[in-house]
Amino acid sequence: MFTMHARRISGIIIFLSIVSICSPAARPQDRIAEAVARESASLEKLYLEFHTNPELSYCEERTSARVAGELEKAGFEITRDFGKYNDPARKSHGVVGILRNGEGPVVLVRADMDALPVEEKTGLPYASAVKTTNDSGTQVSVMHACGHDMHMTALVGAARALAALRAHWKGTVILVAQPSEERAPGGAEAMLRAGLYDKFPKPDAAFALHCSSTLAAGKVGFVSGYALANADTVDITVRGAGGHGAYPQSCKDPIVLSSQMILAFQTIVSRETAPGEPAVITVGSIHGGSKHNIIPDEVKLQLTVRSYSSKTRETLLKGIERVAAGTAAAAGFPKELAPVVDLHPDEFVPSTFNHPDLVARTLPALREQFGAGNVVEQSPVLGAEDFGFYSLPNHDIPCFMLWLGAVPESKIKEYDAAGKPLPSLHSSQYAPAMHPTIETGARALCAAALSQLKK
């Protein structure tokens, strides 16, 4: 009786073992959560280190060294200080890590490293207290107010998981820790100018993620197609002929002309672009004059211009030049006092276009990883990000940037009940929840990469 019972148990164990090996749990996608969970405590410490030691754009020396060290420990071949800015005096602190694992696709995963000149006011026990001197010689506070500390932590977590699961995939993974995303020209352009796709394998697909200020922690958001906007910076010098405010007939008033131009710019959006085509012209700064009764010689305008398509971008920029010149001419300003429009093409940031085919190929892995209800479609926004550079001008390399939920569900309910908007990115109050955001980010990047690698 005992022998028969023992044999029956033994048979059940063998059967369950076979089922376990053949079951979905044996697939690498299902082992990601376990691999990341093992690193959770270590990743939390790393996140806190990044958060309490932020560095401004172009100054990420300590941060990049820390990321490079972590990727190297995970088994990646590391290239440090990679990148080439337009300004030869600037040193790029970009990091490229490569894990080669046989023949197969090449997948790039990118995270950004720089922080912002913002004083943190979250009240968190680990809030940044860092102060530094900026390019202008002014002392400023520094904060990771855009979640780049979380992006780096997720990248390291994904690196460890991919290395741990390398028996289950084939191909090459390239991890990029990019500097100066918050400045233009930024680090993505510098990495490509230095030969990212010449000196390292050219990827078949590229992924990144960005913290969301509205999506609940534990969720992942996606947009198929245009997700973030083209961003152009425009400076206009409105020239006039100054004089006494009591005798405007003897002057050419650049303040009145600036006011007319600002209003006229909005008709480019409302009357020259299709109603369904997103477009924004914002005049964020107007400076001119020194005293109540003096008409100045000039006024300075600073604009940000946002669009998705190249055609709309061209319409907006050409429209700004035309409206500036035409408004001045209509006001009787001579040609020698025509406004000077500087479009700053070197500071252009391209739109982020999530390639629909890549999104479609990746979503099943994300839904399997988190559950369909936690993979949420989002609306495109007119914020900008230089991740679009990695796709190259004609989207030759399909890219996909995910939104990473980072707000506690309780906080969303609290703010909804009070009728208040949640703290936005770049806010002094922005504070992503460490958990489960760290784990979700690492799992999302790992799952996305595995969905494209050879099984």
Image: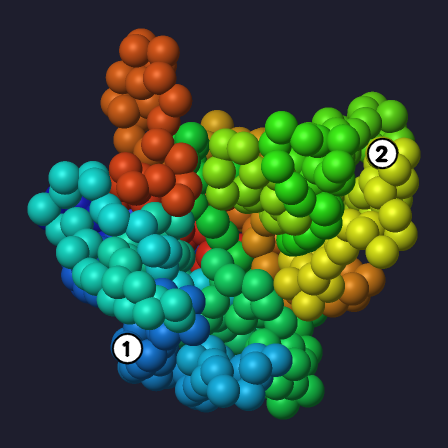
Count of numbered marks: 2
Q: Earlier in the sequence, mark 2 or mark 1?
A: 1
**Residue 8 showing in the rendered view:** no
Residue drawn at x 13%, y 51% is 126
* Residue 167 relative to residue 395: left or right: left
**Residue 204 showing in the rendered view:** yes
Residue drawn at x 31%, y 64% is 138
Q: Quadrant of residue 77?
A: bottom left
Q: Where the N terminus falls, by quadrant?
A: top left
Q: Nearer the viewer, mark 2 or mark 1?
A: 2
Who is closer to the viewer here, 35 or 66? 66
Q: Where the C terminus falls, by quadrant?
A: bottom right
Who is closer to the viewer here, 295 or 337? 295
Residue drawn at x 47%, y 67% is 180
* Residue 29 relative to residue 132: left or right: right
- The amino acid sitting under disc 2 is Ala
Who is closer to the viewer here, 113 or 44? 113
Q: Find disc 1 in the rendering and name its residue.
A: 62
- The amino acid sitting under disc 1 is Arg
Residue drawn at x 28%, y 58% is 140
Query: What kind of element bears circle 2?
Result: loop
Find residue 392 and report its horizontal and vertical position in percent.
74, 67
Find residue 425 and report its horizontal and vertical position in percent.
41, 41
Residue 331 is marked as 2
Eyeballing the image, is 77 above or below 133? below
Q: Quadrant of residue 122?
A: top left
Query: What kind of element bears circle 1?
Result: helix
Find residue 179 and report its horizontal and vertical position in percent.
46, 70
| Neighbourhood count class around disc 2 (C-alpha, 10 Å): few under 14, some 14–19, many 20 upward | few
Measured in 3D between alpha carbons, the distance from the residue under mark 2 to the one under mark 1, in whole angstroms, is 54 Å
